[in-house]
Image (tube, rainbow, N blue to C red):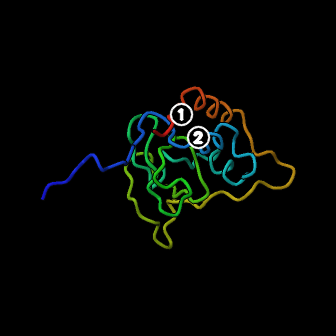
Amino acid sequence: MSFDRSLNTNQIVTQGWSNPTSYSLYSHGWPNEPHVRAAYEKGWQCGGCAFFAKFNSDYGLCCHSKSRHHLETVFEHFSCPVIVDESWESHSFEEPLPGHIHRHPPAPPPASGQSGSSKGSRASLEHGKAHAKIRPRP
């Protein structure tokens, strides 16, 4: 059987963000989601998520079916509410088993009166913005 490959409309972006809304969340530091910002600052970022499929040194595909960013190209230093912190090396593409402590849940919202920001994480965010590219979908 022969397949007509011209019917495949799947466009995979490998050199930048595939969704401008996700880039906006990142570039503004998740202004309405302090728990995501806190997870990001703890280092719980896409590059270390069990469901991150790396394309290159900066970007990869979110493969977590429970994430609002599922099947988006995201920056390795991005984060989301359902990140499964695993490793920055190999990824299992599986949910953690009950009782395993090497993976972490998203960070809780910061206590009242705390900004939850630090100079180090701000520098990382600025570094990411400088390297981030948005590629519009065709």
Numbered badge on residue 13: none
Q: Position of residue 38 (x, y in %)?
A: 68, 49
Q: CA distance from mark 2 to mark 1?
A: 6 Å
| SS for callout 1 | loop
| SS for callout 2 | helix
Q: Nearer the viewer, residue 24 or 56?
A: 24
Q: Nearer the viewer, residue 109 or 19?
A: 19
Q: Position of residue 111 (x, y in %)?
A: 81, 55
Position of 129 with respect to 84 (left or right) is right
Residue type, numbered disc 2: Pro
Q: Residue furthest right?
A: 113
Instruction: Determine which quarter of the picture holds residue 50.
Output: bottom left
Q: Give the answer, above or below, for where 66 lies relative to 22.
A: below
Q: Give the answer, above or below, for where 71 lies relative to 55.
A: below
Residue under circle 1? 134
Neighbor class of circle 2 (other Cα within 10 Å; few <14, some 14-19, many 20+) is some
Residue drawn at (72%, 52%), measured in percent from left and top? 33
Q: Nearer the viewer, residue 134 or 51?
A: 134
Residue drawn at (70%, 39%), measured in percent from left and top? 28
Residue type, numbered disc 1: Ile
Marked residue nearer the N-terminal end (2 or 1):
2
**Quarter holding the N terminus?**
bottom left
**Quarter holding the C terminus?**
top left
Residue drawn at (41%, 37%), measured in percent from left and top? 14
Q: Are marks 2 and 1 in contact (CB under 8 Å)?
A: yes
Q: Give the answer, above or below, for where 79 lies relative to 138.
A: below
Q: Position of residue 31 (x, y in %)?
A: 74, 46
Residue under circle 2? 20
Residue drawn at (69%, 41%), measured in percent from left and top? 29
